[in-house]
Image: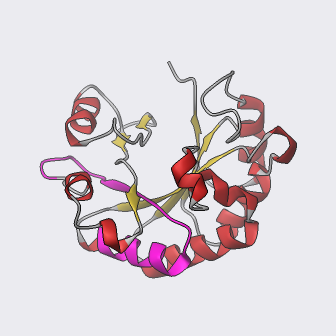
Amino acid sequence: LDNNLILAPMAGVTDRPFRQLCRRLGAGMAVSEMVSSNKALWGSRKTIRRLDFDGEPGPVSVQIVGADPAAMAQAARVNADNGAHIIDINMGCPAKKVCKADAGSALLRNEALVANIVAAVVAAVDIPVTLKIRTGWDKESRNGVRIARIAEQEGISALAVHGRTRACGFAGAAEYETIRRIKQAVDLPVIANGDID
């Protein structure tokens, strides 16, 4: 990367023109909007637009979301075949419709499934796999350190941590102390996310 400033993936925001603009203005990397691992959605106009990387400087990082290890592995393979240089797994989205499907940050409540998804995706592709998480589901169940250790053990190349729980949404201050503890617990590159000005 040219530098360590990375545009976070944001649904409805980080489309190709926005990614290109941020790269032109100095971002070292820009991650795509999340793409569902649900094959039924792959032909939709929205998904096709999200998978358009024409003219983007590398590395191209594509974020995938879902709760089934086999479907996530297949989504990773399809995106790698379409030109992705990095696959990013979403375990940070707090949206109700995503969590209702036991995906996004809802996965933080099931550490065994986290391990299975990460292992399946890492085994499915020959490119780096990164993971985006939150500090936990809520303040009573902050398990970011355990999730980070699982991710490292299963072969994740880098970890992005949004310094809030799922229950916090986007309110309150980001927990940089929690991000520091996560960083100290693993040898992975850790990307701090939240309240970056």
Residue farthest toward the top in the current orientation of the protein: 197
Magenta span contains residue 56: yes
At x 36% / y 47%, what residue is drawn?
33
| Residue 95 percent across, percent down from the top left | 54, 44
Residue occupying image coordinates x 73% and y 47%: 137
* In-image side of 178 versus 169 (left or right): right
Q: Which residue sits at x=73%, y=65%?
A: 110
Residue 65 colored in magenta in the image: yes
Residue at left 67%, top 42%? 166
Q: Picture quarter containing residue 186?
A: bottom right
**Residue 76 sits above or below residue 106 on the image:** below
Q: Which residues are magenta?
A: 54-79
Quadrant location of the N terminus? top left
Judged left or right of residue 107, residue 112 is right
Q: Quadrant of residue 25?
A: top left
Residue 93 visible from this viewpoint: no
Q: Position of residue 159 (x, y in %)?
A: 58, 52
